[in-house]
Image (cartoon, rainbow, N blue to C red):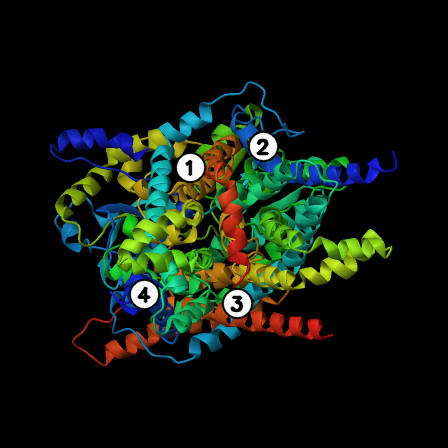
Amino acid sequence: MSSTRAGWFFVAPALLAIAVFFLLPVLGGFGLSLTDFDLYTIADWHNLRFVGLRNYARLLETPLFWRALANTAFFVVAGVPASIAVSLATALLLHSRLTRWAKAFRTALFAPVVTTLVAVAVIWMYLLHTRYGLINYGLSLIGVPRIDWLGSPRWSMPAIALFAVWKNFGYNMVIFLAALQAIPGDLYEAARIDGASSAQQLRFITLPSLAPTLLLVSLMTVAGYFQLFAEPYVMTQGGPLQSTTSVLYLMYEEGFQSWNLGSASAVAFVLFFLLLLITRLQLALARRWSAA
Amino acid sequence: MKRALPAVLVNGALLACAVGSLFPLFWMLSVSLMPAGQASHLPPPILPRGATLAHYRQLFELAGMGRSLLNSALLAALCTLLSLCFNVSAGYAFAKLRFRGRERVFTALLGALVIPGQVAMIPLFLLLNALGLVDTYAGVLMPSLAGVFGIFLVRQYALTLPDELLEAGRIDGASELRLFVSVVLPALRPILVTLGLFSFLGSWNDFLWPLIILERDELRTLPLALASLSREHKQDLELMMAGSVVTVLPALIVFLSLQRHYMQGLLAGSIKG
Amino acid sequence: MVAQLLPEFEASHPGLRVHVQQIPFLSAHEKFLTAAVAQRTPDLAQLGNTWIPEFATIGALEPLDEELAATPSLAPDDFFSGSWSANEFAGHTYGVPWYVDTRLLFFRTDLLHEAGFAEPPRTWDEWLAMLRAIQQQGRPGPGGDPRAALFLRLDEPELLLALGLQQAPLLRDGDRYGNFRSAGFVQALEYYSSLAQVGLLEAQGASQVANLWDDFARGAFVFYIGGPWQLGELGLRLPEQLRDSWNTAQLPGRDGPGASLALGASLVMFKGSPRRREAWQLIQYLSRPDVQRRFYELTGDLPPRRSSWEGSDLAAQRGAAAYRAQLEQMYSLPAVPEWERIKGAVITLEERAARGVITPRAAAVELDRRTDRILEKRRWILERAATRTERNPAGSSRAVGALP
């Protein structure tokens, strides 16, 4: 068998699976988003109209959509920097020469990443309980009054953001750690000989060397955080007062509770376009920064 | 004394973070053993008084958790198997086999990584509905048959295989298939473990897709059972924690025993070629 | 619980086994719809009656007209008219009422006496005056805050919908357009907003465990709006000394006790079941007055048929008298598949009006705007069907409930 034929033969199953179960639905989704597919259509597929971009236009007029967008944006803006900061800080700590039992610490800090989201969301629901939750109890010990975390529209999203940071920071931490370990030691040697302090070494060697990794991590984390769904679904059902309805949660409600599959698909694609835009933006900013 | 301080600070900070990371999990275990209602007191107890396995019994006898555990395990195992079948050959081919359009196709696949999976879910549901696969194991597994990430992972690793090894085999007259089975697969063993691990954990922890495609209680996976339980038994804190333990523990054990491979895969996947 | 009634059924119908699957209420709607779309439905189910239009529209439900005609023991007259009409859609009957849910006033009799009132209110004006008086008195409640007159959950629109329906239909023109900007509904919304001003408001979804009974027992408020399932719960959860210190009353109307909503669940049969006859036998069995009385003994759920109430002392149970009276005055909600969405819009806007963010009039106008948009496709389908006179219109309306 020639190499070319073998090559195609080897990739065919995977490509076929991807084509049928991913690409086709994605295209189908885009098509759906241009129709008014809903319950009536399920009843009788003649009840289907091509409506062009009307679903998208309607979305822009739907207050809940903007709410969902704002909620998701808040989650990203609050959660991503916090998550990256914690990841970086712990990675730096783990990387330090002063650290003992680094492997054990690394495992402990990483553990939340592999836990099932639903299971730990349930744990946090109770940790955040207004009356009996340990978090409020801890706060009360330092004189802070009880916060109704999951019951107040103001604090519900911050609570979810806190939970998300706890769950995910280990992932980026490991990536940072690997990148830190890849920085040649000679750079630090040379700096030490020149009399640079730890803080200066951090600022002039470590951080610049980490720049590409930082970019990668922020791209991945932003993309991940934009796809917020399971936490609102399990912990708050999008409430209270729709304060935790994320864009994907909206899609789920539209699609699988109201069966407005046309507009639900539009929501999904809006998310996609948004992500694309934001990724582009991040890349452009990064290019600017590295040029400066 | 002064020189010891930084070390104390660094290790102390790490310890604090580790406690922060692990405490909720520890608390989950602790509460699951508390008698019913004990956790709903002020001040909230941290350790059980009169530890009991009653909630676990209730889960398995009354709430059918055993069935959900079985479903999760079976689905995860099948997913792992399928993932290995579909992705390994493709990853190897993209790395080592020359064929026209190879680079273009691979770049296109990488582009697909940007598309969030949820975009495909609704039409995928309709497609599987037309095929009669809603509420079946097959329906759950179909979308994860091939993943770009898996192919990417294998390719990264396969790139490091020495070409001479493969050339030698070809000169000896071995067919590509033979080469793949007897030379390549053994060489790829570490990444196979990693890929298997990722697939297993990915399937075990999957929530949204099984939520959409599964309907009967008998087919529920652990995350679904837990979510359903949490909506009905909001007040039964201890029961819920037992459910969480059952859901989290197997995955944690699998992860801990194969940690090294997991980290390896994570890093390979993150450093884009 | 239903499972306990089944052995007798299975015994009297040899060869039939009934398999019951319980679904948590919060996910029931999604699960049923998904099942209906995938055509993997059970033979028979207990379905919320506000969902019947949706399921009937997608052709998932079996019309029961034939079976009903052949079963004189299931006479529509024996059921409360509001709840029977909630099972009708496009000229057919799709369900037999199983559980009737309606909303009543629940109140602490001792606290009401303390405030100077011997009887619960009968009219809107009486109630508002009572609530204001209680608020004025400002007696201390638990935890130091003043006692509230009324506990109102803003994410539960049933009270507002009942008040609205007392005045005018919620939709107009064959259920093609919203009727929220009608004088009747606006008045109801204005009244509701005034209630909100004297009330203890909570707009909370499912995530916080509302310790309703705890707070009721501790005197945090005097009135709240509740449903029949609480009649039994209160009996269990209140401390001994308060067992007789509460009661229920019908919802006030403009000029006397008013109507409430006909909610609840019905027994429905899904299309495509090969066991249609057997499923009907089970429905018949479960609708027998003696079986329903036994169900009451098991669960405390009061029966949906008049004959099941007769010859028993069900109405003597605390709180049941007002409930029984209310059952005679109920309106069903509009029978359109889009109802859940419209209800969502109602919740959003009534909450804003109640919190004073916008005026009731503005809220009503906006509600109409959203409702009209939600119903756009229905209008299109009806128009299309009207131009094809051979086909039956997809959703011709029926007179809703028993409007005065």
Discs 3/4, front? 4
* Amino acid residing under circle 2: Phe
**Could you give the CA–CA distance between mark 4 and mark 2, rounded to whole angstroms?**
49 Å
Mark identifier at residue B26: 2
Q: Quadrant of the N terminus of chain B?
A: top right
Which residue is more in the foreground, A189 or C8? A189
Quarter of image, res A103: top right
Which class describes the residues within 10 Å of circle 3: few (<14), some (14-19), or many (20+)? some
Discs 4/2, front? 4
Left or right position of B115 against B45: left
Please give the chain letter of the residue carrying mark 3. A
Mark identifier at residue A7: 4
Q: Are marks 4 and 1 on the same chain?
A: no
Discs 1/2, front? 2
Quarter of image, res C16: top left
Q: Residue at x 28, y 33 (%)?
A: C3
Give the residue at mark 3. A65
For mark 3, give the secondary structure.
helix
Give the residue at mark 1. C320
Relative image position of residue B189 (x, y in whole percent): 40, 46
Which residue is more in the foreground, A179 or A220? A179
Please give the chain letter of the residue carrying mark 1. C
For mark 2, give the secondary structure.
helix
Q: Are marks 4 and 2 in contact (CB under 8 Å)?
A: no
Vertical side of B19 occupied by C342: above or below = below
Mark identifier at residue C111: none
Which class describes the residues within 10 Å of circle 1: few (<14), some (14-19), or many (20+)? many
